[in-house]
Amino acid sequence: MKKTLDNRIMIMILMWVPLMIVAQKNIDSTVYKTIKVKPGTLDRSVHLADEPHIVYYDPAVKNNKVLLWLTGTGGTTSHVPVDFLTTALESGYKVIAVSFITTPAVSEVCTGDTLNLYPDCASEFRRMRIYGTPRFSLIQDQSQDAIVPRLVKLLQYLSDNDPQGNWSDYLKGKVPDWTKIAIAGQSQGGGMAQFIANSASVYRVISFSGGWDYSDSENRKIAGWYYRKNATPEKNLYAVYHVNELAAQSLKEICTALKIPKDHIFALDKPISFQESELKNKRNPYHGQGIRNVVYKPIWKTMLGSGK
C-alpha cells in the first residue's frame, strides 16, 4: 500500500515539473546584466509595494532607449512577462520593471455611486498613482509610492552606482527624459502608460488591454481624459487587445478617442494559449493574451521598433 502511495506521489510530482519550469522562467542573466533594488532602499519613507525594481540590459549596446514596464492590477516585479521583455532587449532596449502599488484598481474604486458623484475619479486616481500629487483620498497611496518619483529615484541610484549603464542620460534634472523612454503596460499598467503619454512626450507607448476608465457607471461612457490632446505624437502610440476579452468594445472606443493610428491598433483573435488555459478561476481569460502568448511576438517587434 505504501509503495503504491509513494508511486502516486511521484507521478504527481512529475506532472507538476513542467508547470514549475514555466513558472520559474527568467530573463537570461548570462546575456543581460540584471540589477535589483528595493524602493525602500532608495527612500526610507516607502513602506508599501517594496518588491524590488528590476533592471535588465546588454552592456554592449550604447545610447539606447529604456523600456519602462508597468504591471497590471495585483501584479509585482516577481512575475514579469519574460518573453515580451526579452523581445524588447533583443530589440536594443534597456528594460526597467518598476515596483509600485497595483491594488486597488481604478475599476474597483471609480465605479457605482462614487463615479456618479465624481466623473473625473479615474483621472484623479491615475494622477495620484503616477505622480503622487495631488492627494487622492480614496486610495492609500502616498507621494513616495507613485510611479514617477520611484522611477526618478531609481535612475538617480543607477547613475551613481552603475556608470556602465549611462543612466544619467535618461534624466532631465529631476524628471525622466521621456523622449528616451518607451512605456509598456498590461491592463492597469497600460492605462498608466496612456495617461503619462497625455502629459509628456514619450518615445513610444504600448498598451496591452489598457485599463478601461469610465465617467458614467450606468452608460459605461469612457472617461473624459481619453479625449484630451496627447503630448505624445499619435505616431508613437500603440495598443493591443483581444476581441474576446470582456472590455473589448470599450478598449476599441478608447483607441479611437486617443486617436491611435489604425495600423497601430492590434485587435487579436488567435486561440487562447496553453499556459493561459491552465489558469483557474479566470473570468476574463483572454485579457492577458496580448502580453503572454508568444504567437504575437511579430506584433511585439512591430510595436517596439528599435530601441537603439
Image (tube, helix red, strand yellow):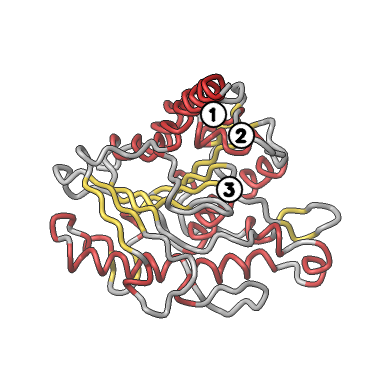
Q: Quadrant of residue 209?
A: top right
Amino acid at the residue labelled 3 = Ser
**Outermost front residue:** 1
Q: Say which quadrant the C terminus sits in.
A: top left
Q: Which callout, 3 or 2, points to the residue nearer the camera?
A: 2
Contact? badges 1 and 2 (CB < 8 Å):
yes
| Residue under the image location 18 percent in, 68 percent down | 160
Is residue 228 or residue 163 the one in the foreground?
163
Q: Nearer the viewer, residue 289 or 15?
A: 15
Q: Residue furthest right?
A: 218
For the residues labelled 3 and 1, the Cα–Cα distance comes to 19 Å
**245, above or below 148, in the image:** above
Residue placed under numbered mark 1 in the picture: 275
What residue is drawn where x is 53% and y is 46%?
186
Residue neighbourhood size for the residue with mark 2, other residues' Cα within 10 Å, grouped as few (<14), some (14–19), many (≥20): few
Which quarter of the rendering shows the N terminus?
top right
**Image mark for residue 279:** 2
Query: What x and y, as percent, mark residue 54?
Result: 34, 54
Residue 14, horizontal then vertical, whole percent: 47, 23
Give the side of residue 241 with respect to residue 118, left or right.
left
Residue at disc 1, secondary structure? helix
Q: Of the residues under marks 3 and 1, which one precedes in the sequence?
A: 3
